[in-house]
Amino acid sequence: MISKYYKMKKIFFTLFLSLTITMFAQDQKNNFTRSIESKHKKTDFLNKKYISYDINIQFGGKHYMKGTIVQETGGGKIKITKEDGSVIIFDGTNVYGKGISAKAKAGARFDIFTWSYFLGLPYKLNDSGTIWSNFEMNTWGGGKLDSGKLAFQSGIGDAPDDWYVVYKSKENVLEGAAYIVSFGKGKEAAEKEPHAIKYNNYKIVSGIPFSTNWTFHLWTLKKGYTNQIGEVNLSNITFPDIVSFTIPKESEIINAPK
C-alpha cells in the first residue's frame, strides 16, 4: 500500500514538473514575442489590408533585384513587379510568373516568399506552426540581446526546415535575425553557412515602425553577425486601399522544387 502511494506521488510530481516547465516555456515565448508585436504595432498593421513598398536588393556587391512588392498584411497574396517588367504573383495557392527568364525562375519562389517574410517578420512570430525555444542572451553587435529560436512544424511553407534566431533590443525593437535558407539545398547544407539580417534605419509610417535598410551578414551564435554580404533598401512604403492580384495573361505556374 505504501509502495503504491509513493508511485502515485512520483507520477503526480512528474506530471506537475512537466506542466510547470511547459507553462514556463509558454510564458517565455509570450513575453518575448508579444513585446515585439506590441512595439511594432501589430494590431495597427493588421488593420491595414495591403502594404506596398519599393525594394532595391544588392548581394555580393552586385545588383540582384529592384521593383515593387505588394502584399496582404495578414499573409496570403503577394505580388512583385520587377523593374524589367516581369511579374511574380502568389495568389494564396500557387506562384505564377510572367516574363521570368529561365535563369530567374529558379529563384522566383524564393523571392516571392523571402522578402515579404522579412518585411512581415515582427507580425508573424505567432503564426500557426511556429515553434519557439532557447530564450537566452546572445551576442549581437557590440553587446548581448535577448534572443529566441524560431522553428516550424513539418509541412509549413516551401522550407519548413528553416530556423531563425530572433534578436530584440531592451526597448523590444526587432534588431535582426539569424537564419538558414534550406530552400533548394536542404538543412544540412544550409547550416554550414547561416546568415543574419540586421534591421536598420527605422521610420514611422502611419504610426507603424518599419526598417528601411536591411543589411545581410555572415553569422555564428558565438559572435553574432559578422561580415556584410548584402543590403536591401526600402522606400515609398504605403497602405493602398485597392490592389489587383489578377494573374497576367501568358503567366506560368512556378512549382516548388522536388
Image (tube, helix red, strand yellow):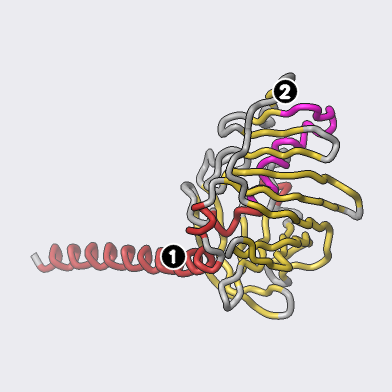
Residue 251 - label: 2
Q: Which residues are magenta?
A: 97-118
- The x and y percentages for residue 28 are 45, 68
Identity, as a three-letter code, of the amino acid under mark 2: Ser
Question: Which residue occupies the extreme left position in the image?
Answer: 1
- What residue is shown with label 1? 30
- Crowd tier of the residue under label 1, counting other residues whose Cα lies within 10 Å: few below 14, some 14–19, many 20 or above: some
Question: Which residue occupies the extreme front position in the image?
Answer: 241
Real-space CA distance between mark 1 and mark 2, rounded to the nearest whole angstrom: 42 Å
Query: Which SS class for mark 2?
Result: loop
Query: Which SS class for mark 1?
Result: helix
On the question of residue 258 being in view, the answer is no
Q: Does the magenta-highlighted stretch encompass residue 168? A: no
Left-right relation of 250 to 25: right
Give me the residue at 72% from left, 56% from top: 194
On the question of residue 225 being in view, the answer is yes
